[in-house]
């Protein structure tokens, strides 16, 4: 398993009238977790797209809301890759409040898509090489 933590502060414009992080923003927080997890492996979405021609479109997204996050909370975005990818990669993400209590949990499944061939492909070797030692 590979895991990585990053942090994000809740901005005022991301909250609803009650001062809670608006539920629609959690998907963007999950994306921050994915992007930073990939970056922690020494890769970037930009390089995957520009240099390797690989896109990672979202296939499915599941979210479970447990407790609210509030304006100005510094949240921890804990992201895990629990199994080696095949044609898909799954990111499990927990959003934790400053007291390390779970606010929301999500599971995002993405496929590896060859931009030139316009088709789903197996996980590229450059990604597998980065992950293999963790499994």
Image (spheres, rainbow, N blue to C red):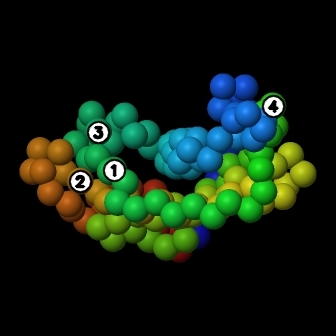
Q: Secondary structure at mark 3?
A: helix
What residue is disc 2 on?
Answer: 113
Measure the alpha-carbon separation of dots 3 and 2.
Answer: 10 Å
* Residue position marked by numbered label 1 in the rendering: 56
Q: CB under 8 Å between callouts 3 and 2?
A: no
Question: Answer yes or no: do the residues labelled 2 and 1 have beta carbons within 8 Å?
Answer: yes
Badge 2 density bin: few <14, some 14–19, many ≥20, Cα 10 Å: many
Name the element at disc 1: loop
Q: What residue is drawn where x is 17% and y is 45%? A: 115
- Quarter of image, res 9: top right
What whole-number distance in Å separates the C-alpha atoms at marks 3 and 4? 33 Å
Identify the mark nearer the N-term, 2 or 4.
4
> How packed is label 4: few (under 14 Cα within 10 Å), some, or many (20 or more)?
some
Q: CA distance from mark 2 to mark 1?
A: 6 Å
Given residues 17 and 84, the one toward you in this image is 17
Using the image, determine if residue 10 lies above or below residue 83: above
Residue carrying label 4: 72
Would you name the residue on which mark 3 appears? 49
Circles 2, 4 touching at the beta carbon (< 8 Å): no
| 81 and 104: which is toward the camera | 104
Return the disc, 3 or 1, that comes first in the chain's sequence. 3
* Label 1, residues with CA under 10 Å away: few <14, some 14-19, many ≥20: some
66, 54: nearer the viewer = 66
Q: Secondary structure at mark 4?
A: loop
> Sequence-wise, which precedes: disc 3 or disc 4?
3
**Mark 2 falls on what kind of element?**
strand
Q: Which callout, 3 or 1, points to the residue nearer the camera?
A: 1
Q: Is residue 33 left or right of residue 123?
A: right
């Amino acid at each position: 398993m590979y895991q990585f933590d990053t942090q994000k502060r809740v901005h005022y414009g991301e909250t609803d009238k009650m001062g809670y992080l608006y539920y629609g923003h959690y998907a963007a927080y999950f994306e921050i977790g994915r992007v930073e997890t990939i970056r922690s492996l020494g890769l970037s979405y930009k390089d995957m797209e520009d240099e390797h021609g690989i896109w990672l479109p979202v296939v499915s997204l599941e979210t479970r809301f447990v407790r609210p996050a509030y304006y100005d909370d510094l949240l921890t975005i804990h992201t895990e890759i629990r199994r080696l990818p095949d044609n898909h990669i799954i990111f499990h993400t927990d959003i934790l409040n400053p007291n390390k209590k779970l606010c929301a949990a999500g599971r995002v499944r993405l496929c590896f898509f060859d931009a030139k061939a316009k088709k789903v492909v197996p996980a590229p070797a450059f990604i597998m090489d980065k992950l293999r030692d963790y499994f």
